[in-house]
Amino acid sequence: MDLFFLMSVLFQVLKRHWFNLSAFLFLMGCSVPDWNDLNPFSDDTGPTITTNIDQISIGVLSGVNDEWPVLIELVRVDQEILIEKLLGINAQQWFDGERNSFRLANPQTILNSWEVVSGTTLEPEILNEPDDYGGVLFCGFIENSPPPQRVVEYGNVHITVEESECIINRI
């Protein structure tokens, strides 16, 4: 009997205040937060950035990385805040799987990867980069990988891989 009474009271309240209730529910629906706000890698705020690379070439000096291949990844994103997040990740973390999480959280990420061996030079590769993307370069060595570098060059870029670092030059 008590349940019946409560339901009848609820029905009477809804019958009298249906407009207020529907307006309240509508306003609550409009204020639902964006799910990207809950994502630690995704952020749609901040200015757009520009690093327009037309083509890239890579040269590796002899004897580098104890003759093991060096992993090189150019990561390009369209927000300054994402550049800052990338610069906060060390190369070991990046190559150990952080890149997968980052790419899932930021599907607009453009990633170019190379695995280069000692004493080789890769011919220039055209990147077809959008104008409003900025880049971060990760170099993975067996030991002591250098920190990621912001790519501020534009046009044609050459990366020289030395004993324990990658040097970015505009050519």
Image (cartoon, grey):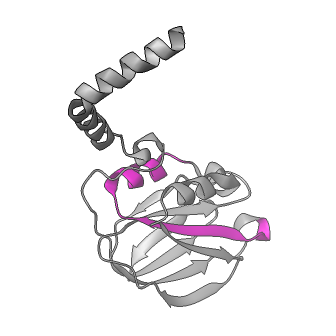
Residue sitting at x 37%, y 25%: 11
Q: Is residue 1 above or below residue 33?
A: above
- Residue 71 on the magenta span: yes
Residue under the point 54% across and 66% down: 166
From the viewer's side, name the closer residue of 44 and 95.
44
User: Where residue 158 sits: x, y (%)?
Assistant: 47, 79
Q: Is residue 154 above or below residue 135?
A: below
**Is 111 located above or below residue 81 in the figure?**
below
Residue in the foreground of this view, choosing between 63 and 158: 158
Query: Looking at the picture, does residue 50 appear above or below residue 32?
Result: below
Apparent side of residue 171 relative to residue 142 in the rendered image (left or right) = left
In the rendered image, the quadrant that contains the C terminus is bottom left
Measured from the top left, where is residue 27 in percent x and y?
Answer: 25, 38
Q: Quadrant of the N terminus?
A: top right
Number of numbered discs overlaid on the protein picture: 0
The residues colored magenta run 66-89
Looking at this view, is 32 or 69 the one in front?
Answer: 32
Q: Position of residue 168 (x, y in %)?
A: 45, 70
Which residue lies most toward the right here? 67
Which is nearer the eye, 142 or 66?
142
Q: Residue at x 66, y 57 (%)?
A: 95
Q: Quadrant of residue 24?
A: top left
- What residue is at 43 percent from the left and 50 percent from the top? 42
